[in-house]
Amino acid sequence: MYDVTTELHGRSATLTPRGDIDHDSLDQLRSCLTGLPDTVAEVIWDLHAATFVDVAGLHLLSTPTVPAQITPTSLPPRATRLLETAHATFPDQGWDRHLATRGTVHTTAGGNRAPAGKCDKGTAPGRS
């Protein structure tokens, strides 16, 4: 089991994984997306507690979540270098849109925050 905290803020959700983001954790991290309520329009991956990020992090950021927008924040240095390399290698794929958000702290106006929950085996707060 991978530890991911999920917080719902109106139409956005912040997911905070703790540990490595690699091939072994990718499917479970993606299952956290499918467990979000249909009303979520933005998914924020808060990576401050990610201890390691490899190419699986790129796959995670490119996971289709239509209509939700994916926004990473608190990128560790290795994840930033990985995105910079991906952008330099594949400039037409838009990896630079994620670099513009590094270090950004997201807040939600109005303070409507659902209680934090844990994403465990594909479930998230708001879904059973």
Image (spheres, helix red, strand yellow):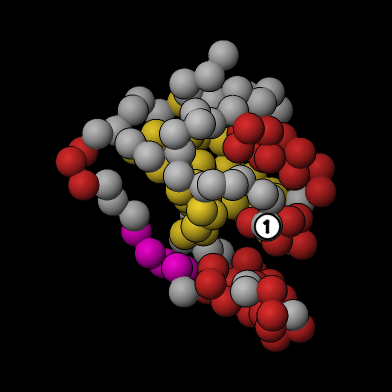
Query: Is residue 115 visible from the viewing direction of this image?
Result: yes
Q: Residue at x 33, y 36 (%)?
A: 10
Badge 1 marks a residue whose secondary structure is loop
Kind of residue at badge 1 = Ser
Q: Which residue is mark 1?
A: 62
Q: Residue at x 63, y 32 (%)?
A: 34
Tell me where residue 33 appears, x and y as whole percent: 60, 37
Tell me where residue 83 appears, x and y as whole percent: 64, 72
Query: Is residue 78 or residue 117 the one in the foreground?
Result: 117
Where is the C terminus found, in terms of image quarters?
top right
The stretch drawn in magenta includes residue 103: yes
Instruction: Relative to 44, say whether 84 is above or below.
Output: below
Tell me where residue 54 appears, x and y as whole percent: 74, 61
Tell me where residue 109 appears, x and y as whole percent: 21, 47
Q: Residue at x 57, y 76 (%)?
A: 96
Query: Is residue 50 or residue 70 the one in the foreground?
Result: 70
Query: Is residue 37 or residue 85 the one in the foreground?
Result: 37
Instruction: Relative to 105, say whether 86 is above or below.
Output: below
The extreme top residue here reads 128
Q: What is the magenta range?
A: 101-105
Q: Residue at x 54, y 47 (%)?
A: 67
Q: Main secondary structure of the magenta part?
A: loop
Q: Where is residue 4, by image quadrant?
A: top right
Instruction: Relative to 115, say whether 8 is above or below.
Output: below
The extreme front residue here reads 67
Left or right: 68 with respect to 107?
A: right
The stretch drawn in magenta includes residue 2: no
